Amino acid sequence: MRKADLHCHSTFSDGTLSPTQLVATARAAGLAALALTDHDTVEGVPEFLAAGDRHSFHCVPGTELSLDFKGTTHMLGYRARGSPAPELSLDFIQRFREDRNRGIQARLEALGFRITWEDVCAIAGNGLMGKPHFAIAMLEAGIVGSRKEAFDRFLGKGKPAYVNKRRLTAQEGIRLLLNSDYAPVLAHPGSLGLKDDGEYDAALSLLHGWGLVGVEAFHPDNGKRFSKTLSAIAARLGLVRTNGSDFHGANKKIPLNWVLGHSPLSVSVVEELERGISAAKERLGPDPNDPTLL
């Protein structure tokens, strides 16, 4: 069965492979298609699509947005092929991210650690700066013995250098994606941190009401029982089930071909997502608070 991995990250966010390298790796791994879903950016997509064209490989443009909903809410978005909609603009979200990063740097300085903005920029390279890059800077400066220690002692939620990032609400994020013909899909649902199946059912029902198209039913963090639960909820609500490795290169141990042995879904899921965009727009209708939407 031909399969697609619909969740991976490049050097344009917190991955270690370039978009071009991701395409080569996906082809070698036996995948039929790959989606690039860098955090809060689509800047790596042009290089990604160009590499796909050179190698006649199916590349799906995407992103992953951090939203304000429950626990840690990440929303994947996938662009429909041939869409005439405006390009997805995430400049304002990147400003939210920069504000948070400036705050982290200031807090580290207040703690007596000399981690300069230039140090962290150099580590991030052409990617969007984030907490993992601060962790590397702290490791290189000898402040901590590992990146995990950096998060456990300083960068994790509630720790001395933690700064919350301003986020769109889940409803705003879903609308933003749909308005640019991106299919919104809830990433690794377990990160919502809910107590039981009933709470996940209720949360997905609410998101579906706001225009959610799919749910990442198969992800390394899900487990077989949770994947079965998510599949049942998806069937009831008419959500598209997706799969993804959440590949970050050397920053995580999960391989890019994880879906080959852990998901029953074929590459046709990409077409289901594209159909789901139109269905969600028709179901929602125009936004009464903003007649320019949809």
Image (cartoon, helix red, strand yellow):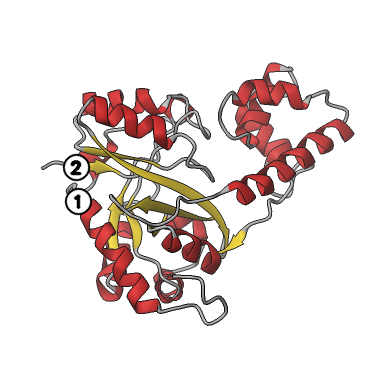
Q: Residue at x 56, y 75 (%)?
A: 290
| Kind of element beneath mark 1 | loop
Which residue is more in the foreground, 184 or 228?
184
**How many numbered marks appear?**
2
Whether residue 255 can be seen here: no
Quarter occupied by the N terminus: top left
**Residue 260 drawn above or below residue 143:** below
Label 2: how many Cα within 10 Å (few below 14, some 14–19, many 20+): many
Quarter occupied by the C terminus: bottom left
Which residue is more in the foreground, 290 or 112?
290
Mark 2 touches mark 1? (CB < 8 Å): yes
Whether residue 203 can be seen here: yes
User: Viewed as shown, does residue 232 lie left or right of 17?
Assistant: left
Amino acid type at circle 2 is Lys
**Residue 130 drawn above or below residue 174:** above
User: Viewed as shown, does residue 88 lie left or right of 265?
Assistant: right
Identify residue for label 2.
3
Identify residue for label 1.
265
Q: Residue at x 83, y 36 (%)?
A: 106
Please identify the quarter of the rendering in which residue 258 is found: top left
User: Viewed as shown, does residue 11 lie left or right of 144?
Assistant: left
Amino acid type at circle 1 is Leu
Q: Residue at x 47, y 41 (%)?
A: 42
Q: Residue at x 64, y 36 (%)?
A: 131
Which residue is more in the foreground, 60 or 115?
60
Label 1: how many Cα within 10 Å (few below 14, some 14–19, many 20+): some
Of callouts 2 and 1, the N-terminal one: 2
* Horizontal and vertical percent position of residue 244: 33, 45
**Residue 238 drawn above or below residue 64:** below
* Horizontal and vertical percent position of residue 62: 40, 46
* Horizontal and vertical percent position of residue 85: 39, 57
| Kind of element beneath mark 2 | loop
